[in-house]
Amino acid sequence: MPRNAAELLALGDDRYLSTLALRVFRAGLKHSLVDAKWPAFEEVFFGFDPEKVTLMGAEHIERMMQDTRLIRHLGKLRSVPRNAQLILDIREQHGSMGRFISDWPVTDITGLWRLLAKRGNQMGGLSAPRYLRMLGKDSFVPTEDVVAALKSQGVVDKAPTSQRDLAAVQEAFNQLHSESGRPFCQLSVMLAQTVNH
């Protein structure tokens, strides 16, 4: 089950940044490998305090490239201070990342994906919906099986990337949610299970 608004609000901005960075580093890698190294990331990124992380310069990131405890991917390491700045910008506008995420209507969750992909760093593809799922924000994830189910129902004819296709998928999930009362995360899994391989 997704977290409720109070639970999302209770998460500090450091946890939003840590989870965002974890999502970025997990992309394309074995999750258990990343998870095993995560305590070192928490240490070198000052517990993912966004204010401290935004002060990290290029020389700090370069030193991290020599740290064997970390996954030494320069682009992903550089994304952390950039995403920390995103969280600080959102905090300035909305009070906290938790307030921003919890207040965003699930009936426009694809709009939140687009915002995170546009303003965040390394947040394209399925990273934004997976990040929201990791946080506990109710979201569907358009995996291959979910897309196959949506294609079989005539909602889309390919993986949704255009605003038009994302709007059609959002509308389909809104309808399913309205009819069933189930959260998007459950509907996503149920749709995926309808696909025969």
Image: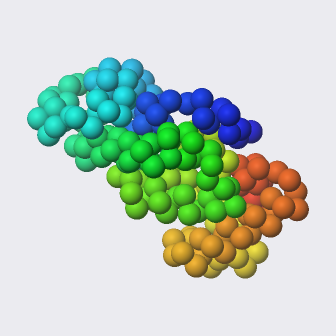
Left or right: where 55 falls relative to 122: left
The reply, left or right, for residue 22 in relation to residue 70 is right
Whether residue 18 sits left or right of residue 111 in the image: it is: left
Question: In which image quadrant can residue 173 be found?
Answer: bottom right
Residue 67, horizontal then vertical, whole percent: 20, 25
Q: Position of residue 163 (x, y in %)?
A: 54, 75
Q: How many labels sit on residues?
A: 0
The image shows residue 3, relative to residue 129, as above or below, that is above
Type of colouring: rainbow
Placement of 139 over or under 45, stated as above or below: below
Q: Farthest right residue?
A: 179
Residue 175: x and y in percent read 80, 67
1 above or below 115?
Answer: above
Q: Residue 10: which quarter of the image?
A: top right
Residue 193 shows in the view? no
* Placement of the N terminus among the 4 image quadrants: top right
Q: Identify the residue shown where x is 14% and y is 40%.
A: 58
- Residue visible at 58% across and 79% down in the picture: 164
- Side of 191 relative to 55 (left or right): right
Whole-percent x and y of residue 41?
34, 26
Identity of the residue drawn at 76% across and 75% down: 153
Q: Residue furthest left?
A: 59
Q: On the image, which quarter does residue 192 sit in?
A: bottom right
- Is the C terminus in the top left, top right, bottom left or bottom right quadrant? bottom right
**Residue 143 seen in this snapshot:** yes
Q: Which residue lies at the image location 55% right of the left edge and 47% below the top edge?
A: 100
